[in-house]
Structure formats: C-alpha cells, structure tokens
Image (tube, coloured by chain):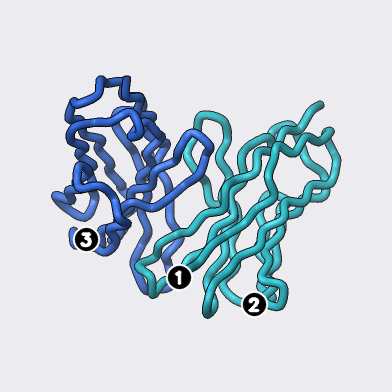
Amino acid sequence: DTAVSQTPKYLVTQMGNDKSIKCEQNLGHDTMYWYKQDSKKFLKIMFSYNNKELIINETVPNRFSPKSPDKAHLNLHINSLELGDSAVYFCASSQDLLGSSYEQYFGPGTRLTVT
Amino acid sequence: GNSVTQMEGPVTLSEEAFLTINCTYTATGYPSLFWYVQYPGEGLQLLLKATKADDKGSNKGFEATYRKETTSFHLEKGSVQVSDSAVYFCALLYKAAGNKLTFGGGTRVLVKP
C-alpha cells in the first residue's frame, strides 16, 4: 500500500546508455513531479505534470523526457546518459495544483549511477 | 527569484538537547513554507507546514513559526532523540508557480546517545 513508488531503487549504467525510471502513485492525486538530488543533497525540481499535461519544465536538458501515460504514472526517460546525471531522482505527487491540498508526497528515490 | 537558505550542518547533538535549525527565505508575495525530513536511505517526508504569517506548524515535537517580518521559518525541537538523526530541508512553495517547491540546501542532524 505504498503511496508513491519508484522503480528501480538503484540503477547503475554506462555513459551513453538510455534508461527509464518509473513512478506510480495510488493516492488519486492529479499532479506529479520529478526532482533531482545531487551528491551534496541539493534538491531541485525538474518537471511537473497536472492531469497528464506538462506544467513545469525547469530548464532540464532535452535528453530528459518525462512521460505521463495516465494521472497515476509519471515516467522519466533519459537518453545518452552522462556522468553528471548521477544523482538521486525523486518522484512526488500532490492532490491538486491550485486547490487547498497541495502538499507533496515523495517516493523513496532512485539512485542513478553513471559510470 | 525565490530562494531558501538554511544553516549548514552537520549539527551534532546529544540526546535530549534542544535543536534549532535556522531557515530564511527570499520571495515576493506570500509563499507557503515547509519542513521536510529525509531519514538515511529514504525519501522525503513532510514534517510540518505553515501557509500564512504567524502560523505555527508542529509535528512529532517539532515546531516552526512563519515569521514574515524576518522572512524566517526556524525549526525547533525541545528534546531530540537518536531517531531524529536525519537531513532536514526547509522549502517554500507558490501555488501560482505550478506548485514548484524551492528547497534549501538541507541540514544534517546527528543525535548521539
């Protein structure tokens, strides 16, 4: 009964590869997000989707492409992986965008290591 | 733009000591303010929040008051436990900005028995 889940938890891959991280929420929320946490623990938003529509794209390289097949899923595909992509990626969701229930609930994170 | 500044860690305390983590923000208008906690190897959990000036958020013995005049949202706990060892993040959010959370750099807290 995990609220926000991500797969895989760990991902080790080589430079130049293409990989995907999946996120699912069973909270019935309308909005989902991807955040990146670097090695110094600094957290920064990458994308947000509301009802499958892209809302925020925070100057992320276009090698990163989010895809939302439905409201409960927001996947992150990364092409041509680079060393600097090594980080922990967190998915999050919130009930709605502008209403009163906008607290964000985070998944456990996916630790991506590019070698 | 909006930004959040937290005191740098690590903060090392003995059990039952008083904890304060300073957080100040720069923003226009009236953001909502949050504290998130990240326990070792886990994701972020919402600890507490405040949505307007003078609001006090509280949870699990932690408290923080939204101070508009000093643009601060300091986190306090009167008596910490070893289980409070974690990284604490202060964050602000504007609903009109697409619900984007802007985080501080995080403060690592280590509580020793």
Colour in which chain B is shown? cyan
Q: Marks 2 and 1: same chain? A: yes
Residue visible at 68% across and 45% down in the picture? B8
Q: Amino acid at mark 3?
A: Leu
Residue visible at 22% across and 44% down in the picture? A64
Task: Specify few, some or many for label 1: CA neighbours under 10 Å numbering under 14, 14-19, or 20 or more.
Answer: some
Which residue bears the numbered disc 2? B53
Q: In the image, is A28 to the left or to the right of A80?
A: right
Task: Specify few, some or many for label 3: CA neighbours under 10 Å numbering under 14, 14-19, or 20 or more.
Answer: some
Q: Which mark is residue B94?
A: 1
Would you identify the image quadrant in which residue B58 lies?
Answer: bottom right
C-alpha distance separating marks 2 and 3:
31 Å
Location of residue B5 in the rendering, given as x and y in whole percent from the top left corner? 62, 56
Colour in which chain A is shown? blue
Which residue bears the numbered disc 3? A54
Q: Give A7 or A11, whichever is nearer the viewer.
A: A11
- The subunit letter for the residue under badge 1 reads B
Q: Give B82 or A33, whichever is nearer the viewer.
A: A33
Q: Amino acid at mark 1?
A: Tyr
